[in-house]
Image: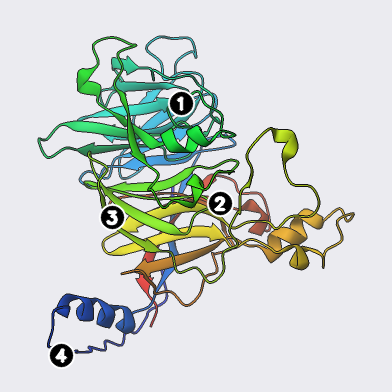
Amino acid sequence: MRTKYIPKATVVLALTLFFVISSCGGSSAEDKSENSASNYKLEVFDSLQFNILTSRLTVADVDPETGDMLVLQPTPPKYWLFDKDLNVKAMLERPKDDPEGPGEYGLSATFFGEGIATLGWFKVTIYDREFNFEKAMIPNYPAMGLIMSGYKNIYDFRTPEGEHQLITYYGQPQTNLAPLSVDYYKKMNIVDLVKPSESENLRDSVFYPFGKLTPDSRYLSGKYFPFLMPVYDVKGDKFYNTFNSDTTLYVRSLPDADILNSYTIPFDKFILMEGAKMGSIGQRPSGPQDTPGQIQSVFHHDKLDVIIYTSGLKVSEKAAFDRTSSNYPQQVERANPKKYIIIRNGERVNKDLTIDKRVYYMEYMDDNGIIYAMQDSRALDKEPEKYTIYKLRIVEDN
């Protein structure tokens, strides 16, 4: 069931730079020398192949100690627990109206302590590792967001006291306000922090707002920003996040949401969404508009951040394409491709921004720094016989 890709041998040239600084800042000099000594890239080094007839499979989580893997099919919802050799250890498939089931849609999943937590449509369900039901929890705010099937939107972490808690996201903040009001942005939280230990029945309020916009955020400018969403990763006791149309990455503590660090993302090019006049939807700008840049994914491993994004296109750039042509969308996509940037200490450390043509969407990075990615069948000469998920890793590129 596994197909391995053996990378070509690489020769690494190690250069060590020493800086002597009389005042404070020795660690900063060391960080800069590391940046100047190494460049990095993403490489496809392996793949997972599944004999499962489906339109979508997602690797939701990997246990770093055992290698056990959670895989889900979003709809109809179905979950598998595989061992490291891709043998099925357990499977979950229940009717959508089953009170002990994961719900109507399979959105995501995570290992949760010694068990498993599934993210369904406005429902978090806890199971043991044989998918025996333990408890279910429902958010205490109205469902108004998008159904984000297959996106990694549930993470487990441990508090300093050793309690397992969850970070979840349902495509919306905890508010019934519309994004056409100033108060929406003032009150919006980034994601939810879930405390399953406090839940004794289905509707206990254990979904707490986590994080908010900083006072200098451009989203507090009094303008309307459509489809604003956080893009984030959780590693250890830290929460790494930006927004899909932003240029700043924040590092926050868990579970307190204190900002520990932030930096401006060193894009090669990124067209900002300027926002629109606040008011009714009918007052949106008319005429040709720039295509703004979009951040798709954020991953963190060791001291490196990986950001997947598109730069966007100016109206003048899009004018070169014939809007009446049947392949206009393909022309725009080629002119505005997905790219990636690897960042260390706020500086870009990859030369090539091009994503492997076999990769369509990078879904999740495990604790060992392996990224699991959806295959782009358009790059293949023939239809694949098995469902394939690529594995990528960060390697030196000197």
User: How many marks are shown on the rendered structure?
Assistant: 4
Residue in the picture at 37% in, 48% down: 214
Q: Which residue is mark 3?
A: 368
Q: Depth check: 330 or 208 in front?
A: 208
Residue 142 position, x and y percent, is 48, 19
Q: Depth check: 100 or 130 in front?
A: 100
Residue in the picture at 33% in, 56% down: 300
Please state, as top left, top right, bottom left or bottom right, where the C terminus lies in the image.
bottom left
Residue 20's tag is 4
Residue 340's tag is none
How crowded is the residue under tag 1: few (<14 C-alpha within 10 Å), some, or many (20+)? Answer: some
Q: Nearer the viewer, mark 3 or mark 4?
A: 4
| Secondary structure category for the residue under label 4 | loop
Q: Depth check: 167 or 59 in front?
A: 167
The amino acid type found where label 3 is placed reads Asn
Along the polypeptide, which appears first: circle 1 or circle 4? 4
Q: With respect to residue 234, does 114 lie above or below?
A: above
Q: Which residue is mark 1?
A: 175
* Whether residue 315 can be seen here: yes
Can you tell which quarter of the image residue 274 is in?
A: bottom right
